[in-house]
Amino acid sequence: MGPVRQWLLGVVLTAFAAALARQLAPEGKESAAVRLVGGLLLILALLRPLAGAEWSSAALEAGSFRLQTEEQARAYREKQIEALSAVIAEKTETYIWDKAYQLGLDVTASVTVAAGESGIPLPESVTLAGPYSPALAAAIEEGVGVPVERQYWLEESEWTRKESERG
């Protein structure tokens, strides 16, 4: 006999036995007790297949789902940090270029961003191509928070300037 047919037969027989007991019980409190017990037995008969279910595989599937969710969340946070780092680097480079323009300097800036103590990306170092300017270095330290020790100036040498004039 198939498992579904066996379960259904158990439910029908339990319902039949509960109805028979109800008919045979005297009126009053006994009848209420018989109806309660019959109802509980019918519920147990209905839920019997759940007792034989394989719950460990469901727990394993839920665990793998949780693991996938955590991996996706981690990947999302990494992409979010990368995007935020790119925006911070771009805005910082624009700020430095604007300050250099105000000082009459022609420089290009490249900003390196790293996670700070709180995990938020912050400008870590600046590489500048152009003539060194103490005023711009101070503005970068004050406005951006990158100390002079992490500001790298690439000044054009005399030899490079003379070679470019000849060529």
Image: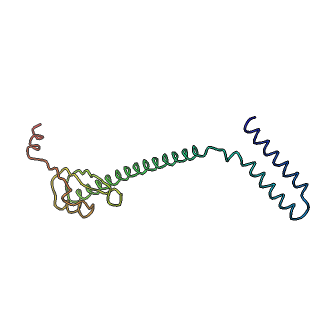
Q: Position of residue 49 (x, y in %)?
A: 70, 45
Residue at figure coordinates x 22%, y 51% from the top left: 127
Residue at (52% x, 46% y) in the render: 65
Label tally:
0
Q: Nearer the viewer, residue 130 or 41?
A: 41
Which percent across, then down, holds residue 160? 11, 43
Is residue 137 toward the left or the right of residue 67 in the image?
left
114 in relation to 28, above or below: above
Quarter holding the N terminus?
top right
Q: Residue furthest top?
A: 1
Q: Which of the 4 quarters of the picture holds residue 23?
A: bottom right
Q: Is residue 144 left or right of residue 52?
A: left
Please state which of residues 64 and 151 is positioned toward the viewer in this rendering. Answer: 64
Question: Would residue 38 appear left or right of 133 to someone viewing this image?
Answer: right
Q: Quadrant of the C terminus?
A: top left
Task: State the residue in front, 4 or 103.
Answer: 4
The x and y percentages for residue 143 are 27, 63
> In the rendered image, which quarter is residue 21 located in?
bottom right
Q: Position of residue 137 (x, y in %)?
A: 19, 60
Report the coloring of the rendering: rainbow
